[in-house]
Image: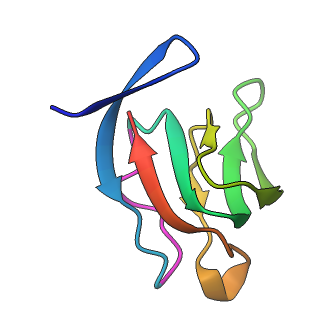
């Protein structure tokens, strides 16, 4: 099993994320996203306080960033995500 250690947190590598369309399935267990190509990342995040969902765009995320988020949806390149080579980490 491949692992990534980032700021004292160990992540298991998951599959690369295809952004041909919005991603809503296969995100269970995702704890973070590795960004291989700089750009914006548009996601839906769940608010645990009231179970609502909010859409958030992380702007100008640099190469090599590990976003410690558990998205419920990742928007496609046609719908707002411009970052590339995203890998899910669990």
- Residue 18, percent from left and from top: 41, 73
Q: Is residue 53 left or right of residue 84?
A: right
Q: State whether residue 53 is above or below residue 66.
A: below
Q: What segment is highlighted magenta in the picture?
A: 21-28
Q: State whether residue 49 is above or below residue 23.
A: above
Q: Quadrant of the C terminus?
A: top left
Dominant SS of magenta comes to loop
Seen from the viewer's position, the closer of residues 22 and 67 is: 67
Q: Residue at x 48, y 67 (%)?
A: 23
As drawn, the residue found furthest toward the left would be 1
- Residue 80, percent from left and from top: 74, 77
Seen from the viewer's position, the closer of residues 74 and 58 is: 58
As drawn, the residue found furthest toward the bottom would be 78
Q: Residue at x 49, y 60 (%)?
A: 86
- Residue 6, percent from left and from top: 52, 24
- Verify whether residue 40 appears in magenta: no
Q: State whether residue 67 is above or below residue 48.
A: below
Q: Is residue 36 left or right of residue 55?
A: left
- Residue 39, percent from left and from top: 72, 67
Q: Quadrant of the N terminus?
A: top left
Q: Is residue 57 visible?
A: no
Q: Residue at x 77, y 23 (%)?
A: 49
Determine which quarter of the picture holds residue 81: bottom right
Q: Is residue 28 visible?
A: yes
Q: State whether residue 59 is above or below residue 88.
A: below
């Amino acid at each position: 099993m491949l692992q990534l250690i980032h700021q004292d947190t160990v992540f298991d590598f998951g599959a690369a994320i295809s952004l041909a369309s919005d991603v809503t399935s296969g995100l269970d267990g995702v704890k973070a996203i590795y960004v291989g190509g700089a750009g914006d990342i548009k996601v839906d995040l769940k608010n645990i306080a009231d179970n609502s969902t909010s859409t958030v765009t992380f702007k100008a995320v640099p190469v090599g960033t590990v976003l410690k988020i558990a998205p419920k949806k990742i928007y496609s390149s046609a719908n707002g995500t411009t970052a590339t080579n995203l890998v899910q980490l669990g």
